[in-house]
Amino acid sequence: LDEFPSGDAALVREALHRRYFIHTVTRLRSIQMKYNQLLVAVDTDKGPAEFFMRWAQDRAVDYGQRGKVLIDVNDNRYLIPDVEAMPPKERTDFTRFIYW
């Protein structure tokens, strides 16, 4: 981007920022199967959220050593930085559905 004119570089950075917007999950409120998809209710660094995600391995991808990125049906991303650091009940609920 350093080789782009400054205005163009700013537009590219803005587009990348929008595309790679990630919510960081601070609390898992609930996760359940509904309509053959997972309905996930969480608190994030940007406020509460509720989303559907397909129950498929490519919708919960590894992040570092112990984290996961959840990808909802609209391709929004929700980061759980460390599954092992979740409170026990939240971790148990999470791994009941996301065990890979």
Image (cartoon, rainbow, N blue to C red):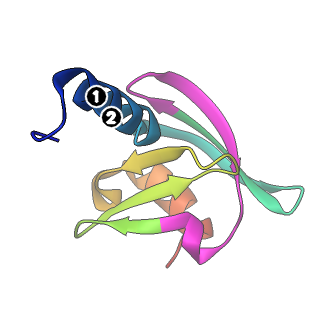
Identify the residue shown where x is 56% and y is 44%: 76
Identify the residue shown where x is 9% and y is 39%: 2
Image quarter for residue 25?
A: top left
Residue sticking out furthest to the left: 2
Rendered view: 38 above or below 7 = below
Provide residue 79's location: percent of width, then percent of height.
40, 48
Q: Which residue is mark 2?
A: 12
The magenta stretch spans residue 31? no
Image quarter for residue 42?
A: top right
Sort mark 2 into few (<14), some (14-19) or many (20+) by Cα contacts within 10 Å: some
Where does the magenta region start and end? 43-60
Rendered view: 56 above or below 50 = below
Closer to us: 13 or 99: 13
Q: Which residue is mark 1?
A: 8
Image quarter for residue 1?
A: top left
Say what secondary structure mark 2 lies in: helix
Sort mark 1 into few (<14), some (14-19) or many (20+) by Cα contacts within 10 Å: few
**Position of residue 25 in the picture relative to residue 48 (left or right):** left
Provide residue 22's location: percent of width, then percent of height.
41, 39
